Amino acid sequence: MTDRIPATLIEGDGIGPEIMQATLAVLDALDAPFTWDRQAAGMAGVDAAGDPLPGATIDSIAHTGLALKGPLTTPVGGGFKSINVTLRQRFGLYANLRPTRTVVPGGRFDNVDLVVVRENIEGLYAAMEHYLPCGDDPRGLAYGAGFNSRAECRRIVRFAFEHAVANGRKKVTLVHKANILKILSGIFLEEGRKVAAEYEGRVAVDERIVDACAMQLVIAPQSYDVIVTTNLFGDILSDLAAGLVGGLGMAPGANIGEKAAIFEAVHGSAPDIAGQGIANPLALLMAASLMLAHVGRQDLATRLDSGIDKVIRKDGLRTRDLGGQVNTHELTAALVQAVS
Ligand SMILES: NC(=O)c1ccc[n+]([C@@H]2O[C@H](COP(=O)([O-])OP(=O)(O)OC[C@H]3O[C@@H](n4cnc5c(N)ncnc54)[C@H](O)[C@@H]3O)[C@@H](O)[C@H]2O)c1
């Protein structure tokens, strides 16, 4: 009998419960080895426990070290701080892995297959923002600071190279803005070059300034294999990459640390379509595939990826965000059949 693996399950807000139900149905059909500990977060956490990140949810992730998470609603402006950011910081989830590959044929590009590795806990998202108190006086001044440590730059670049080695990828591109942010981005490039030298002969290295990288991604995404970069650049480039292959409904993400890993769809809770049964569950399913690979079940991850390819490429099924008319339930039923 397969050893069971305890994992935390957070359904999330908005379309979260719908796409999570779809994902669990497909994981069941695959006989995935997870034993779920269901917990709440986001608005669901507020409703259940008066807290967007209840202590029981934190304890569960600390215990299992593994979570599959639906999207969480974050109030704009005031309200509580993004739970996603809090989780990354709380569990030291330093690496954000965002694979992007063409699944839906006939889009802008038929041959995209790249991975963006984003540093997840430092950079300009350290939330060190200030406002000089002039009210709405035109002299009011907002300023923000960020930091990159040498140790973290080394760790994220090493993660990218190790990911390349483990997955048969050939090239890692260090993406930076060291020509302008000579210190903040400069040390990322310096440390990146040192780590890259350790992989000489095994994985090729390349360097790109972030703005040139953005342009080249739109023109010739096939020229990239693994991109590694700092927090803000990685956030933007990984969404750009998702746009090349059908949008956020096709974008999975993994947040990986030394003691825990949280897998999620990149998109949000999509309140505009919540409860209508039309959400695309593929991003969360692809995140589940990353989770299976993470726990050493590449066999099941490959079956899941092949099932997704079959229903999209061969059967031609599409949810509305991909220009089709299939609803979540119909797509799920086809996926269950494809992986069984
Ligand atoms: N990882 C996360 O938990 C996460 C990520 C981004 C945004 N959010 C939160 O989600 C809420 C809504 O944010 P938003 O509207 O800016 O972004 P969103 O990603 O929720 O939605 C943007 C657009 O994409 C569509 N969309 C998104 N996912 C889809 C799917 N699976 N299938 C079909 N269509 C889909 C939506 O209908 C909407 O039109 C906000 O509270 C935001 O803070 C959470």
Image (spheres, rainbow, N blue to C red):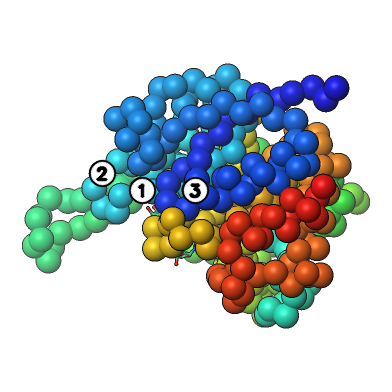
Can you identify the residue that label 2 sits on? 79
Q: Secondary structure at mark 3?
A: helix
Q: Secondary structure at mark 2?
A: loop
Q: Nearer the viewer, residue 46 or 164?
A: 46
Where residue 166 sits: x, y (%)? Answer: 84, 43
Marks 1 and 2: CB-CB under 8 Å? yes
Say whether disc 3 or disc 1 marks the residue closer to the N-terminus.
3
Q: CA distance from mark 3 to mark 1?
A: 13 Å
Q: Secondary structure at mark 1?
A: loop
Can you identify the residue that label 1 sits on? 74
> With 203 as the anchor, is 156 left or right in this view?
left
* Amino acid under disc 3: Gly
Where residue 7 sits: x, y (%)? Answer: 62, 28
Q: Quadrant of the N terminus?
A: top right
In the image, farthest residue toward the right: 201
- Looking at the image, which residue is at 50% across and 45% down? 17
Can you identify the residue that label 3 sits on? 16
Say whether disc 1 or disc 2 marks the residue closer to the N-terminus.
1
